Image: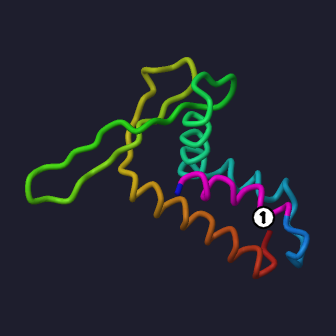
Amino acid sequence: MFVGIFHLFDWLFEDLTVEPKITDRQVKAHFDSSLHLKICADYTNSYKHLMRKTGGYARIDLIDRPAHSPMTVTVAYWERDKPESKKSIEVLELAENAMTEWRIFLDKWQNGQL
């Protein structure tokens, strides 16, 4: 799920059929303004690369399955070389917020507001 959310970044400006054209600069500006999109990128890249040279880190932090309750999964994220900056977010909340951020971007693009 987070891989798809992150890689929409590339797909938007690489798609030659999109009109009007979306530039990598437009996508990057929106992406960089969204904590949730950045966490998805950090999770995807942390999963792929054990050690990272740039960006932050994000990993599955907690899987809680209490009796007779829905399972909860959280992702911890922190700045590279700053483990004391570690925070957590529930994965469904992260996914919903990240998708909302992409919807906002696409709405702005459709309305000529980029």
Instruction: Check residue 8 for magenta coloring.
Output: yes
Q: Quadrant of residue 93?
A: bottom left
Q: Position of residue 27 (x, y in %)?
A: 77, 58
* Mark 1 lies on residue: 12
Q: Which residues are magenta?
A: 2-14
Q: Residue at coordinates 14% horizontally, 59% vertically from top-left?
A: 69
Q: Is residue 67 left or right of residue 112?
A: left
Residue at the farthest left position: 67
Q: Quadrant of residue 56?
A: top right
Residue sitting nearer the eye, 79 or 46: 46
The quadrant the C terminus occupies is: bottom right
Helix, strand or loop: magenta stretch: helix
Q: Position of residue 105 (x, y in %)?
A: 68, 68
Q: Residue at coordinates 38% horizontally, 46% vertically from top-left?
A: 89
Residue at the farthest bottom position: 111
Instruction: Check residue 113 for magenta coloring.
Output: no
61 lies above or below 109: above
Q: Residue at coordinates 61% horizontally, 58% vertically from top-left?
A: 4
Q: Secondary structure at mark 1?
A: helix
Q: Residue at coordinates 84% horizontally, 55% vertically from top-left?
A: 24
110 lies above or below 83: below
